Amino acid sequence: MQRPLPSVPFVAGALLVAVSLAELTGVAVQAAAGPRDEDWAAVKAHLTASITAADGLVVGARWVEPLARQHLGDGLLTRERLGGEPGTWPSVWVVSDTARGSFLPGYRSDIAQHFGSLVLLKARAENPFRVLARLEAKLPEASVFLETNDREDPCTYGTSGAQSGNLGWGPALPAERFTCNGAFLARSVVTDTEYRAHDAIYTDVPGDGRTLIVRWPRMTMGTSLRGGYGLYAEAERDGKGADVRAEWRIDGQSVASLTHRDGEGWKGFEALVPTALQRDGILELRLQSPGGQRRLFGMSAALLEAVR
């Protein structure tokens, strides 16, 4: 006598149970292989004893970042370290799940230290340098102007109420900021198209021929100007916005002309300072766009001096 075949609902149910069990097993294996609390505690203790104010800190894998914020805390993951440009740190600590540091171009890695499933290594710049000034941190010392038809109207630096909004509103606008004739400029955190945060000089770049000028008092220029720039993720997502143009000048002489187009994400840059300008001088950043609709722009930069 022939036995009846299982019904379709029975087979489907059995497959669903099998797939569910496989997924639960995978999650359990992944959780067991992931970093333990004691691994993070060991990394934190080592970093606390070893890291200096001159060191950057990079979290190697995206999935590690939320755990790093939870276990390492704000004392180590400061806005400057985590939001600064890796290329502007003479040495960088890397917390990752792999011993490879190749994602840091221009750096060489020391011997990696293992703390359970976590790896901690220190990477040093292949061409040594020292940081003379981080310009986003020096923003309160600058003067800001809104230029229209070659006329510069000064902006006022002061404290107002901090402003923020829902998703898509843009970076938070700090209480301490420059304001002038509808424009603003402040130090904030700008999130790029990969949703990585950058400590940056932030503004909604004006259009219609107006230029926003940031002018720092006399400072030592060093040998290069290095950093990164880009738009807030939601501002360039549709790819329909106007270009943003940024120009760096030293004592009125242009040393870098940069253009950001929608969809390019966060971009790094380096401008070599001409030998004749490697002295004390006036540094200027000029920002403009032919269209001023949601040009939520961030610029991070540092003056560096090569160590010979």
Image: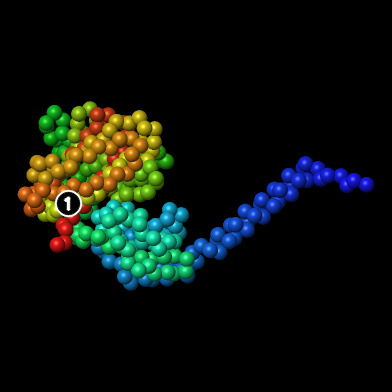
The image quadrant that residue 48 belongs to is: bottom left
Name the residue: 28% across, 37% down.
Answer: 260
Measuring from the top left, give residue 225's x and y in whole percent: 19, 50
Is 43 in front, or is 1? 1
Name the residue: 22% across, 50% down.
Answer: 226
Residue underneath mark 1 = 224
Question: Considering only vertical position in the picture, is 73 above or below 229?
Answer: below
Measuring from the top left, give residue 148's x and y in whole percent: 16, 30
Q: Quadrant of the C terminus?
A: bottom left
**In this rendering, would 153 be left or right of 61?**
left
Q: SS for tag 1?
A: strand
Name the residue: 18% across, 55% down.
Answer: 304
Measuring from the top left, give residue 170's x and y in whole percent: 36, 40
Measuring from the top left, give residue 138's x and y in whole percent: 19, 52
Question: Considering only vertical position in the picture, is 231 above or below 72?
Answer: above
Q: What amino acid is at disc 1?
A: Ser
The residue at the far right in this view is 1
> Is residue 8 at least partly visible in the picture?
yes
> Is residue 281 at least partly visible in the picture?
no
Is 124 in front, or is 184? 124
**Colour scheme:** rainbow
Total residue callouts: 1
Name the residue: 35% across, 49% down.
Answer: 197
**In this rendering, would 107 be left or right of 216?**
right
Question: Considering only vertical position in the picture, is 139 above or below 32?
Answer: above
